[in-house]
Amino acid sequence: MYLDTSPVGSHAQSSTAPDAQARKKEPRELKWQRQKIKQGRGTGSGPDYLPFLQIERTGFQSHGRSHLIFNQKIGRQHHLLSDLELLNFLLAWSLKPNDIREQFPLQAFDFDPQFSLLTPSARGSIQIARDLGIRHPQITRDCPRVMTTDLLVSFADGSHLAIHAKYSKELSNSSDRAIDLRAIERQYWLDRKAQFIVVNENRFTRRLADLMMWALDGMNWAEDPNCLEEILAVIDQTPAHQSLGERLTYCSARLGMGKEIVVRAFKHAILTRRWRPLHLDQEMDLSRPWPGRKSNVQSAITARIAYGPRR
């Protein structure tokens, strides 16, 4: 990805012998941004993608909890900066995309190697800001700040879904400046024929969010799909009045599998909507009955939080 940090403007002059004292006084954020670009942050795809913002002991810190999640299918860790980003990541993952790239940087200038062939007229964030009459984020007068999108989801048909995850309190208290920055981000993805959505926590009930968090390690269940079908069929045949833990234990004994395998498969079925709970607001508790049934169709979970048709 091409992310130029040279001064804005076609007639900007570069110094062949920069003043050492001036270099020492340059903002820390400018040094940080240069370092990230030099490291190749925001470039690559699949297992080679490097998020522009990463979870580190020093440097960028997120608001709230952050999560490092290993995605076995893609083959790398994802850097998710809040619980809300994690929930949206899990939902996006369940849609079976080709790739999910978090903390994805927007090209400041018009040259865009990733989208130029598909949308040659796509503008960079600086030009979009000018056209909208909005001041582009700057580190210094001459150096633009790189903007990012929380999640960029790419599908096999070539379509893309850009997700801006923000808590409702932050959205309702947004300053005019925050609204302007979202307008730049929205237009950036519209230029690239991608769907852009702003998602808050209201798409997820508290129970549903807890359930998805509980099922998190089901992401990396990678056994034969026929094995999953067999496990769900046995669970589906057990009495609904039994506790969920008892039903999973019975399935483990019946199929001669370790219980941890059966539990992870069940979690995978929840995340991929192959198991449909009958009561979405019922608390997950292995010691209590948790009625539900296996399903081959889109479940009520998806109906409540689906992103809608891709375009």
Image (cartoon, rainbow, N blue to C red):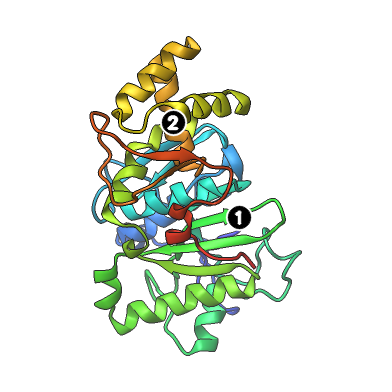
Locate residue 186, reporting x and y percent: 51, 74
Residue type at mark 2 is: Phe
Vertical order, 30 against 99 (above or below): below
Outermost residue to the bottom: 133
Residue ID for mark 2: 266
Towards the viewer: 200 or 42: 200
The one nearer the camera, 16 or 188, is 188
Helix, strand, or loop for circle 2?
Answer: helix
Name which residue lies at 54% across and 77% down.
187
Residue 242 appears at what percent x and percent y? 30, 28
Q: Label 1 crowding class (10 Å Cα cut-off): few <14, some 14-19, many 20+?
A: some
| Quadrant (top left/top right/bottom left/bottom right) for the C terminus | bottom right
Quadrant for the N terminus in the image: bottom right
92 is higher (above) or lower (below) than 149: above
Q: Secondary structure at mark 1?
A: loop
Residue underneath mark 1 = 1
Report x, y in % for residue 206: 26, 54
In depth, the one of 257 and 165 nearer the eye is: 257
Q: Residue at x 29, y 65 (%)?
A: 167
